[in-house]
Image (cartoon, rainbow, N blue to C red):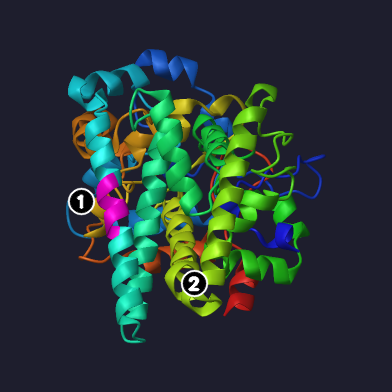
Amino acid sequence: MARLVLPERCGLTPLRARSRGGGAIALPSPPHLAAAPRRPAAAAIHRDWALRVSAPARLASVFEEDKSSSLRGDGEEEAAGSSSAEEFNPGAPPPFGLAEIRAAIPKHCWVKDPWRSMGYVLRDVLVVLGLAAAAARVDSWLVWPLYWAAQGTMFWALFVLGHDCGHGSFSSNQKLNSVVGHILHSSILVPYNGWRISHRTHHQNHGHVEKDESWHPLPQRLYNSLDNMTKKLRFSLPFPMLAFPLYLFVRTPGKTGSHFDPNSDVFLPNEKKDVLTSTASWLAMIGVLAGLTFAMGPLKMLKLYAIPYAIFVMWLDFVTYLHHHGHQDKLPWYRGKEWSYLRGGLTTLDRDYGLINKIHHDIGTHVIHHLFPQIPHYHLVEATEAAKPVLGKYYKEPEKSAPLPFHLLGVLSRSMKSDHYVSDTGDVVYYQSDVETNDSAQ
């Protein structure tokens, strides 16, 4: 059952469509999605891209509504027509390349400082230990909820630092990255190498309907094959925000093995030793937790570790989902020849988390991270600002947050109600919604 209810965050690989019969009809590109004029070379290479676009039908009505509004008032018809002709289409091939983005980023942004990275580790570990010691000493039900929220957030911060180790942005020393990554991730029950390798697959295939590993969409045929209960669990909060531990163990429908099994098809034969090492570290942490539970009692460990761990899982699913979903404008997903590393990376989103930005090491600054994961987290904001003139409208400016990012809860809820599946056909596709699933979730 667990394999059926995992959300798309877990990297569901869709079933391959057997034929066109019975599938969703690929709609032509809406008028307002016409590509903006580009350089002749780019136009020649991609002149047929619009023929392979499958876009939600509702976009056409939005276009008509916007067009009607723009025609109000005397003398505005000509301006409206000009604006419509130049309407930005996020699914069109960009008129720039990775080299142009890279050249815009200052050279010092690529420099990794292991001492600075270790400083963040020391800071976060001291905060985690201090919070646990303070909560255990006070031991008040007035304090425990505050502790759970704070400690769960700090577990998430530890995960992000281990994530940087996996990318090699923590330092240029692979042994240091491995040791620190194993300690940080094992402490929060994540198999470092197993997750690192599957996350590498995500970055190498971001924005690809079938090949992406994390939070990618269901084709309509696969979506329609799910029973109503499974659909409800996949798209009804809070269930999708609790799926990460199951993903580690069983992956998702359509994929075999787990992050603990060196024979899983997500791993290469020469990575078997790495996976076994991480599994051994994970088991060692299980042993430590079992010993602490025996010494301190189950209730105390529930309050000190288990509930913060659940909060950490929610943070992970919440943040990673919103990196790829929930923009007010539908963003494309790709198949076949339309996919490229650059176009896939440009479908990711930056998010503002207010005061949490620095606590979780600017992980919300995600577009440049996806394109260039070797840039250290403490340079991502500067690198993003430098790259914006090149990215132009392909960069989606994040909504500014209050001190705490409660506004993103609404974004998450709306996305869960509208981003259900994509067409079975078409090499550039957009999320569509199922009214019946929304009704059953209410």
Mark carried by residue 301: 2
Image quarter where the N terminus lies is: bottom right
Where is residue 410? Give x, y as percent. 38, 69
Where is residue 270? Give x, y as percent. 65, 22
Instruction: Decide which of 191, 4 is in the foreground and name it.
Output: 191
Labels 2 and 1 touching (C-beta < 8 A): no
Q: Residue most toward the bottom?
A: 141
- Residue beneath the point at 29% across and 31% down: 391
Q: How crowded is the residue under tag 1: few (<14 C-alpha within 10 Å), some, or many (20+)?
A: few
Instruction: Decide which of 240, 423 is in the foreground and name it.
Output: 240
Q: Taken as a whole, is the magenta stretch helix, strand or loop?
A: helix
Q: Which residue is mark 1?
A: 76
- Relative to 35, 396 lies left or right: left
Asked if residue 24 lies in the magenta stretch, the reply is no
**Magenta residues (range):** 122-127
Distance from the alpha carbon under mark 2 to that under mark 1: 67 Å
Q: Indicate whether 192 appears above or below 358.
A: above
Q: Indicate whether 320 appears above or below 237.
A: above
